[in-house]
Image (spheres, helix red, strand yellow):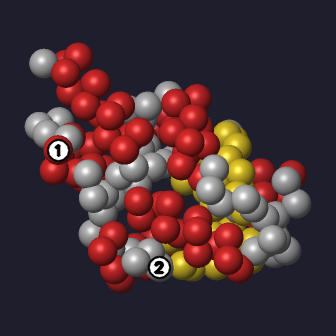
């Protein structure tokens, strides 16, 4: 299971899910309901955007969830939680989360995967910041359906 807010999904996220799909028989992109982060896209929109982009990965699915990651992982029969690591700065936070998840449910492992180096500095947060001004310059970082939706939001807010 690959959990995240995915607001919006980036090419880095998609790279990680493709890598995970080569390792596991089935991978679920688990989209977290997380109002604390004040998502730009609704939960339904985030799920839909991901669905459109993982169609070519036969052993990948997407599902929304609310609550603890390990509880959802257990409910879908996941044996591992996939986490993407872009840079050393991600490691401390991800390490703490992995340790907490291990304490909450020792049967579920955490697997860290790194995206392709071209996505190391890409984050949903940075994409949202740049897209407040332009969407033409984020084409290499997000799938086209995400860029189009961000463009529509930019035009709506202009």
Is residue 92 shown to the viewer in this render? no
On residue 136, which mark appears? 1
Q: Residue at x 21, y 27 (%)?
A: 154
Q: Residues within 10 Å of mark 1 (few under 14, many from 20)?
A: few
Q: Residues within 10 Å of mark 2 (few under 14, many from 20)?
A: some
> From the image, which quarter does the C terminus lie in?
top left
Q: What distance separates the C-alpha of mark 2 from that of mark 1?
A: 26 Å
> On the picture, is 117 further left or further right than 33?
left
How many numbered markers are drawn? Answer: 2
Q: Residue at x 41, y 59 (%)?
A: 11
Q: Residue at x 27, y 43 (%)?
A: 128
Q: In this rendering, is residue 3 above or below 103?
A: above
Query: Which structural element holds mark 1?
Result: helix
User: Splitting the image into 4 quarters, where does residue 81 fall?
Assistant: bottom right
> On the picture, is 50 further left or further right than 147?
right
- Of the numbered discs 2 and 1, the one sitting upstream in the chain is 2
- 2 vs 1, front mark: 1
Q: In this rendering, is residue 137 above or below 77?
A: above
Q: In this rendering, is residue 137 above or below 101?
A: above
User: Splitting the image into 4 quarters, where does residue 17 fall?
Assistant: bottom right
Q: Nearer the viewer, residue 26 or 71?
A: 26
On residue 114, which mark appears? 2
The single residue placed furthest to the front in the displayed view is: 56
Q: In this rendering, is residue 142 above or below 37?
A: below
> On the picture, is 86 further left or further right than 26?
left
Q: Measured from the top left, where is residue 29 in percent x and y?
A: 64, 54
Q: Measured from the top left, where is residue 50 in percent x and y?
A: 55, 45
Q: Measured from the top left, where is residue 35 in percent x and y?
A: 49, 34
User: Splitting the image into 4 quarters, where does residue 117 fall?
Assistant: bottom left
Q: Residue at x 58, y 29 (%)?
A: 44
Q: Measured from the top left, where is residue 19 in percent x and y?
A: 58, 75
On residue 4, which mark appears? none
């Amino acid at each position: 299971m690959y959990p995240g807010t995915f607001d919006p999904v980036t090419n880095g996220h998609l790279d990680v899910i493709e890598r995970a799909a080569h390792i596991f028989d089935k991978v679920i992109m688990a989209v977290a309901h997380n109002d604390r982060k004040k998502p730009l896209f609704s939960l339904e929109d985030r799920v839909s955007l991901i669905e459109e982009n993982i169609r070519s990965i036969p052993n990948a699915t997407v599902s929304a969830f609310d609550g603890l990651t390990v509880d959802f992982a257990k409910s879908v029969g996941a044996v591992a939680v996939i986490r993407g690591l872009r840079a050393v700065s991600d490691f401390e936070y991800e390490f703490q989360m992995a340790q907490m998840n291990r304490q909450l449910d020792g049967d579920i492992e955490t697997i860290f995967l790194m995206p392709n180096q071209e996505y190391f500095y890409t984050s949903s947060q940075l994409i949202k910041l740049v897209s407040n001004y332009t969407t033409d310059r984020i084409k290499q970082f997000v799938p086209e359906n995400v860029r189009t939706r961000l463009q529509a939001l930019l035009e709506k807010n202009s």
